[in-house]
Amino acid sequence: MARTPVTGTDVERAVALTAETLRTAPAEAWNAQAGPMDCDCWEALDHLNNGLFSYALRLAPPVPYVEGRPTILWHRPGAHPFPITTDREAGPEARIEALLMMGGLVAAVVDTRPPAARAWHIWGVGDPEGFAAMGVVETLAHAFDLAQGLGVPFEPPADLVAPALARLFPEAPTDTDPWRTLLWATGRGGLEGHERRGPDWAWHSAPL
């Protein structure tokens, strides 16, 4: 069966759905731990926003990013260790708006770079579709973490999950629910008939 390509539109759908979910949580819930992550919900969303930002930046320049090239200082000492963050006093909405910005950047870059473009990622040198799929999976997986911490429901539609799952996890079963399978693939849940994955899971960034 033909695989459905992942595009910038999928990234925008993922961040929009995540933003909609996060906006249902009360502000006081944001201090809770974000599911299995070792941080609170504020920091978890910072992590997601900076991950998306890095995907856009890696693929955006005429000569895409290669391992070891000095660019942005991603981890800085002090109260604001990431390039992209917001003041907590501004409330959750500021950080949610940043999520939509970062998703838009990824979408714009992956849809305008030629298919032959490549940029480095620790789990494989990726093409534009690979970075689109990474944007979707990164967003949905951490949306799950955030929803757990915030105490709100979250379940993305199968037609959003399945293409990204097939692109980044070609080894994943195709006869199971896509969302449950993505949670299994990212070490966030069990899947009947398959051994549960530990924290050393990885996706396949390189072109299939």
Image (cartoon, rainbow, N blue to C red):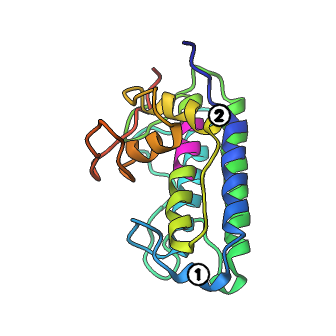
Seen at 48% across and 76% down, the residue is 40
Residue placed farthest to the top in the image?
1
Q: Which residue is mark 2?
A: 159
- Side (left or right) of 145 relative to 124: right
Amino acid at the residue labelled 1: Ala
- The amino acid type found where label 2 is placed reads Asp
Instruction: State the SS at label 1.
Output: helix
Q: Nearer the viewer, residue 24 or 61?
A: 24
Can residue 126 be seen by looking at this rendering? no
- Where residue 158 sits: x, y (%)? 61, 37
Q: Where does the image place residue 4, in percent across and percent down from the top left? A: 62, 22
Which residue does the image show at 51% across and 67% down from the upper left? Answer: 148
Which numbered disc flags the more N-terminal residue, 1 or 2? 1
* Magenta residues (range): 131-139
Residue 150, located in which quarter of the rendered image? Answer: bottom right
The answer to whether residue 73 is above or below residue 9 is: below
Residue 127 rendering spot, x and y as whole percentages: 53, 28
Q: Mark 1 highlights which residue?
A: 29
